[in-house]
Amino acid sequence: MGTANGGGQAHGDALPRDDQDGSVRSAVHLVRSPMETLDDRSVIRWLGSRDSRRRGEARDELRRRGLDEDEIDIAAAVASPDLRTRLEVIDVITRSDRLDPRPWLLMLLEDPNRDIKLRVISALATMSDPGIASRLKARIAQEPDPTVAARIRHVLSLR
């Protein structure tokens, strides 16, 4: 049974049906890249891949999402497997007059390295944004490193 608009769907049936034999039609949505289906953080993580093709796809996807080359370079540094690069990008992020440092720093707060997290917490401590305080409070419950959790508690006690 077709609908009033001829779409071939019976009333209350959410599946697209073929008008000829009532079989279910496949609905295909093609994407340019699998990266298109990922959230921003996941795409950024691919910038740290050893696979140059995946890194290129991640860069292309971030460009498509509106990031400029400077932001993509920051994202690549955030995702870098090199500890020194990730430590250095914290300073670049916090000194930038052009970038909002909060999303980048909050992403780095999830880094597995203690030194990264401690430096990020110090940078976040200088910000008076109440949203940062709530994110830090939430992080305490998830933080497995007691030194990092203690630093977060100390920063929050100063507010």
Image (tube, rainbow, N blue to C red):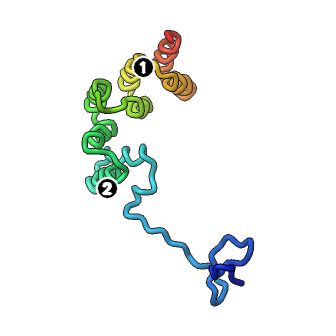
The residue to which callout 2 is attached is 57
Q: Is residue 149 above or below residue 82?
A: above
Residue 89 visible in the snapshot: yes
The residue to which callout 1 is attached is 127
- The extreme front residue here reads 4
- The extreme top residue here reads 158
Q: CA distance from mark 1 to mark 2?
A: 34 Å
Q: Quadrant of residue 123?
A: top left
Residue 97 in the image, given as x and y percentages of width and height: 29, 27
- Asked if residue 73 lies left or right of residue 45, the reply is left
Disc 1 residue type (three-letter)? Met
Q: Residue at x 58, y 79 (%)?
A: 25
Disc 2 residue type (three-letter)? Glu
Q: Is residue 12 above or below residue 116?
A: below
* Pointer 1 with pointer 2, Cβ within 8 A: no
Q: Residue at x 68, y 80 (%)?
A: 4
Residue 96 in the image, given as x and y percentages of width and height: 28, 28
Residue 9 in the image, given as x and y percentages of width and height: 67, 78
Q: Is residue 24 above or below residue 89?
A: below
What label does residue 81 carry, if any? none
* Number of marks: 2
Closest to the observer, 153 or 8: 8
What secondary structure is marked by label 1?
loop
What secondary structure is marked by label 2?
helix
Q: Residue at x 28, y 57 (%)?
A: 53
Residue 148 in the image, given as x and y percentages of width and height: 46, 20
Alpha-carbon neighbours of circle 2 within 10 Å: few (<14), some, or many (≥20)? some
Q: Earlier in the sequence, mark 1 or mark 2?
A: 2
Q: Quadrant of residue 41?
A: top left
Residue 112 visible in the snapshot: no
- The extreme right residue here reads 12
